[in-house]
Amino acid sequence: MNTEPRLVEVRQKVLKQNDLLARALRQRFREAGVYVVSLVSSPGSGKTAFLEKTLTLLREQQCRVAALVGDLATENDAARLARSLAPVKQITTGTVCHLEAAMVERALEGWQLDELDCLFIENVGNLVCPSSYDLGEDLRLVLLSVTEGEDKPLKYPTIFNTADVAVITKMDLAEAVEFAATLAVHNIQAVRPGMQIFQVSAKTGEGMNELLRFLGAKFDESKQLLVG
Amino acid sequence: MHELSIALSMIEMAAEEAERRGGVQVNAIHLKLGQLSGVVKDALLFSYEVACEGTPLKGSRLVIEEIPVVVYCPACQVETTLASLQQFCCGACEIPTSQVVRGQELEVVALEIE
């Protein structure tokens, strides 16, 4: 018997299970005609306030929306989002610092996906770990609040690089914290050239219409793809 | 800190592979780790050692090959290895590009067995 150490080729993605599940979810969402948007950001960047405003405005436009919201411990976020009157479910991750496709799949149990136009998935507040996990979403938004500083994208290039769109939040505070928007935009473009960027305030509503128009166009685009 | 769950997945995968090969001993896992994978090398090495405790892989090594980010410039049709993750641009024309060719790997490529 040969007991010499030898190297055998394996070639397997470590997150293969998650990738397979995410692919299946994406297929399921597509078949049900649901457009899925995920949100990532650091803690306290205003994800929940932004999402509450977005859900409320989309509902006013007769868009059938719902949200899954990931958090380590509490269910406070779901309670806040429920004020938008959209269906909301909390995913409490315990000590896990990110959402995985399996958690999304479990949270969807009992929901009729074909009764929705758009589903939002708010990830756990964390700019590192969520970048590795595909959740089956169509669009990943990364949020950056004006209070965090303009160099955040340079410190966390990976999450900005894996996201599709950047949203700068809390613009109503920009002047008070002397936020340099052009510098922030420059930094985002440095780590993710060509990235579309929106500047919004969930509090005053500034920039929200522009973002909603963008999302609306994305919903239509995906519906046409479905029909085609 | 998701490196621990990544380490556990790798160990599980390697143990299954060892089982399939008739219960061989795994001495090392060889991993390709892209700079854009979202996984920190040192944290993964630390987690690996902890996660191996009480498994058939106890005492095994994790050999990490770090893969730098390579982008493609459609205008120049050249690939550039990025010197910094803070500047995604072509090395020839310096025009920004976000077409990532390599650097997102998180892949077990080989096992050292006996």
Image (tube, rainbow, N blue to C red):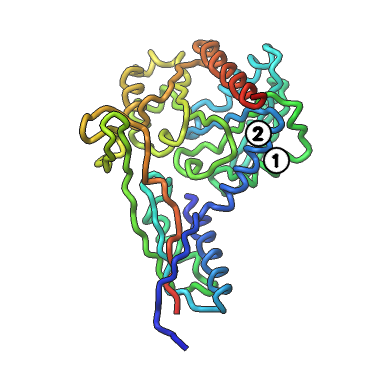
Residue B68: image tag: none
Depicted B28 relative to depicted A105: above or below: below
Q: Which residue is drawn at 46% across and 13% down?
A: A172
Q: In this view, does A112 lie to the left or right of B61?
A: right
Residue A68's disc is 2
Contact check, label 2 and label 1, Cβ < 8 Å: yes
Residue depicted at 51% across the width and 28% down the height: A141
Q: How many labels does the image show?
A: 2
* N-terminal label among 2 and 1: 2
Residue marked by disc 1? A107
Q: Marks 2 and 1: same chain?
A: yes
Furthest toward the left, the residue is B92
The type of residue carrying mark 2 is Leu
* Residue B86, horizontal then vertical, whole percent: 30, 35
Whole-number angstrom distance, CA of label 2 to CA of label 1: 8 Å
Q: Kindly identify the residue that appears in the image at 45 percent across and 38 percent down.
A: A127
Instruction: List x then y, in percent, for residue A128.
Output: 45, 42
Disc 1 is placed on an element classified as: helix
Dot 1 amino acid type: Ala
